[in-house]
Image (spheres, rainbow, N blue to C red):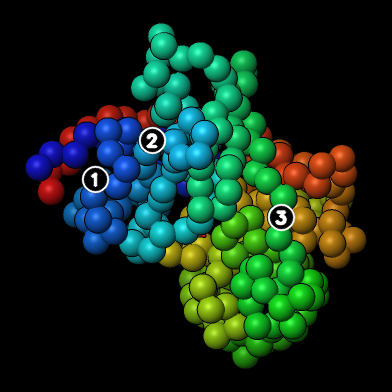
């Protein structure tokens, strides 16, 4: 069977997009997604994203498999790529620049801007330990500047969920962090029953953060949209940054705002189509 796909990336966080509008189930399995994501034996990507029919009045549904085959609740860079992909699929028949997308994190609304960027209403961040989820604090408490022992060091961590779990720690110099050998120790730490994404943040200015990330189910990536959103929230909760900031990732910059009006997070960034192809499975 040959799978038609389109390759996109959001600041180097790259995805295989599949037009799955003709069925309510993904056309490939998580195990096949691992094959497609392999950068030597497959197409190569951080994940596979499916454009499925909408549910409960949404335009479409997004499902995503990480490159390890696990299924996360949401993907920020990925939903920007999905919006661009849908616009391409709909081409002339497109009615609107905005899509209401059903995800496991709730309804997420990306909007195609006239400058080619995509602005996404990422919803309201979840802050309670039970919502992350983590056992670092009692379930009804926020997780702010809590000590966490990883790789023989005690880190001050703040946890935020954007539908998927994030553990954020602020450091003097993100470049110096040995992500390769500590990332998975955070990811698989027993206090995170669903594992976690981990973001290391260096505050350059209150409106400018520098970030590196170890993603759950994907490892080091060049950017993480939900991680950038979660990191801005952690910066506000710990008094380190403004409610609007530029987040500089290895792959480029995202603009993030945590609105005081509606408490929702808005993320703006690019989505780039790289190539189309067919893959035999
Ligand atoms: N690996 C993440 C999903 C992708 C998130 C990231 N690529 C983004 O842009 O938000 C997780 O398992 O929660």
Question: What's the residue at 82%, 42% (across, down)?
Answer: 262
Q: What separation in Å lies between label 1 and label 3 (alpha carbons)? A: 31 Å
Q: Residues within 10 Å of mark 1 (few under 14, many from 20)?
A: some
Q: What separation in Å lies between label 2 and label 1 (alpha carbons)? A: 13 Å
Q: Secondary structure at mark 2?
A: strand
Q: Quadrant of residue 70?
A: bottom left
Q: Residues within 10 Å of mark 2 (few under 14, many from 20)?
A: some
Question: What's the residue at 41%, 48% (across, down)?
Answer: 63
Indicate the position of residue 139 as horizontal and vertical percent values. Answer: 71, 78
Q: Is residue 37 visible in this depiction of the protein?
A: yes
Q: Earlier in the sequence, mark 3 or mark 2?
A: 2
Q: Which residue has dot 1 on it?
A: 27
Q: What separation in Å lies between label 3 and label 2 (alpha carbons)? A: 26 Å
Find out if the beta carbon at label 3 lies less than 8 Å from the nearest ligand 1 atom.
no
Indicate the position of residue 146 as horizontal and vertical percent values. Answer: 77, 79
Residue 47 vs residue 130, the one in the foreground: 130
Report if the CB atoms under discs 2 and 1 are less than 8 Å apart. Answer: no
Indicate the position of residue 43 as horizontal and vertical percent values. Answer: 25, 46
Q: Is residue 165 left or right of residue 261?
A: left
Q: Quadrant of residue 130?
A: bottom right
Q: Is residue 227 visible in this depiction of the protein?
A: no
Q: Which residue has dot 2 on it?
A: 53
Instruction: Work out which quarter of the rendered image holds the N terminus and state it.
Output: top left
State which mark lies toward you, 2 or 1.
2
Residue 3 vs residue 140, the one in the foreground: 140
Q: Which residue has dot 3 on it?
A: 125
Q: Residue furthest front?
A: 56
Q: Secondary structure at mark 1?
A: loop
Report if the CB atoms under discs 1 and 3 are less than 8 Å apart. Answer: no
Give the number of the disc on residue 150.
none
Q: Secondary structure at mark 3?
A: loop
């Amino acid at each position: 069977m040959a799978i038609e796909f389109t390759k996109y990336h959001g600041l180097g966080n790259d995805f295989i997009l599949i037009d799955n509008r003709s069925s309510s189930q993904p056309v490939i399995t998580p195990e096949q997604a691992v094959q497609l994501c392999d950068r030597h034996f497959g197409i190569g990507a951080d994940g596979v994203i499916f454009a499925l029919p909408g549910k409960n009045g949404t335009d479409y549904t997004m499902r995503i498999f990480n490159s390890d085959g696990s299924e996360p609740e949401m993907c920020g860079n990925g939903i920007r790529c999905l919006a661009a992909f849908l616009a391409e699929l709909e081409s002339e028949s497109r009615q609107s620049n905005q899509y209401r997308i059903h995800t496991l994190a709730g309804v997420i609304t990306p909007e195609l801007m006239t400058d080619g960027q995509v602005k996404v209403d990422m919803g309201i961040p979840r802050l309670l330990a039970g919502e992350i989820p983590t056992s670092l604090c009692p379930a009804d408490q926020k997780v702010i500047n809590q000590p966490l022992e990883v790789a023989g060091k005690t880190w001050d961590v703040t946890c935020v969920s954007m539908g998927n779990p994030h553990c954020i720690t602020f450091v003097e110099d993100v470049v110096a962090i040995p992500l390769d050998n500590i990332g998975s120790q955070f990811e698989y730490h027993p206090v995170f029953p669903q594992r976690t994404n981990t973001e290391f943040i260096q505050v350059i200015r209150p409106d400018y953060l520098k970030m590196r990330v170890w993603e759950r189910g994907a490892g080091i990536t060049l950017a993480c949209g939900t991680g950038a959103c979660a990191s801005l929230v952690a910066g506000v909760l710990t008094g380190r940054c403004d409610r609007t900031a530029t987040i500089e990732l290895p792959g480029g910059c995202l603009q993030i705002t945590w609105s005081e009006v509606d408490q929702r997070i808005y993320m703006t960034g690019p989505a780039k189509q790289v190539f189309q192809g067919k893959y035999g499975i």
